[in-house]
Amino acid sequence: MYNSRQRMAEDDETQEPELSDKQKKEIAKWFLLNSPAGEIQYVAKDIRSVLNDDNVYNAAASEAFPLYNKSHLMCLKMPGKSEDVLVTSFGEIDENEYLDPRTAQVVTVDHVKQVCTDVRPASDEELPSPYIEDYRCALDAEIMKYVNEAYPKGICSVCCVRGKDVEEPGPDFELVVVISAARHSPQNFCNGSWRSVWNIEFKDEVQIVDVRGIVQVGAHYFEEGNVQLDAKHECKDSMLFQSPDDSAISLTNIIRHHETEYLAALQASYSNLPDTTFKDLRRKLPVTRTLFPWHNTLQFSLTRDIAKELGIGK
């Protein structure tokens, strides 16, 4: 028979070691980065309560929030202005400053609070050359029309990520189209987002424009459960090098085609879920495809027979 001292020694051996502050920070950071769209502030509140250590929480939040905001293409309101700005790695000037190419403004972002705290005009060095701006501006105008038609709460931006100082035909350059649309309705236990990034390489020597797109769709439904969707789709296309206006129209048509096609594929897969995927996840319904009516069991003859045998209802 073990005595109490032996039991205590065994308990000490089997007890999990205390996590270090660094380990706690990395775990907290993982949860923050994997928060569903529009829910990082709720997750952060719970993590802060669980950690009960502001130093560890602040260290995790300071690393996670900037990455989260940029990967989720966070849309923020400019201070004192009606315009919105997208927080992306493509418009990042430094750790907390982001360029809005359309308005030629640079905003300062408080990542943890998810607000813009300041705004200033962009310098000439931070903006593309007039030659590049012709292509960027024309594409931005066409993409805005498309987004306003396709996404009720969508916002877009077009940035130059390579060759912004090119001043005449000859050298290559690259633009990036960013589209972000989110619908947050926590009071109805659901949130969702659409994020698409289109890298567009203008190759002057071969007179070809290569297009690479990544579309990410996220949805979270959490009323009496926890169902999440995290879908990703990649595609490629190309077209001939054209004038700024003609390129803008052609590129917008390419983006519209691929996004519409992917959305249709998603909708088709959802319509098949009840008869395919969900059948493997849960107990199948009866042939009648209706739930058992527990509130009205007297409609079944078996119920009436049992009641008669037991003398129930007499």
Image: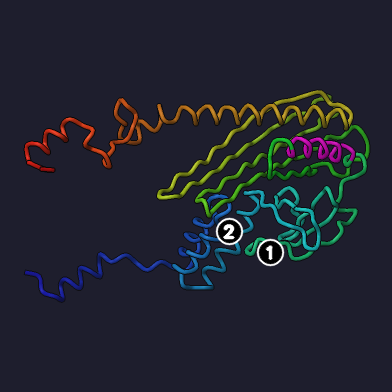
Q: Residue at x 53, y 27 (%)?
A: 268
Q: Amino acid at mark 1?
A: Asp
Q: How many marks?
A: 2
**What is the magenta range?**
134-148
Q: Residue at x 36, y 30 (%)?
A: 279
Please tell me in which quadrant of the rendered image residue 177 appears. top right
Q: Residues within 10 Å of mark 2 (few under 14, many from 20)?
A: many
Which residue bears the numbered disc 1?
A: 110
What secondary structure is the magenta-colored segment mainly?
helix
- Could you tell me residue 305's position as x and y percent? 12, 33
| Of callouts 2 and 1, the N-terminal one | 2
**Nearer to us in this view, 271 or 256:** 271
Q: Amino acid at mark 2?
A: Ala
Residue 135 in magenta stretch: yes
Please tell me in which quadrant of the rendered image residue 146 appears. top right
- Could you tell me residue 233's position as x and y percent? 59, 33
**Nearer to us in this view, 38 or 240:** 38
Label 2 to label 1, Cα distance in Å?
13 Å
Which residue bears the numbered disc 2?
A: 64
Question: Which corner quadrant holds the N terminus?
Answer: bottom left
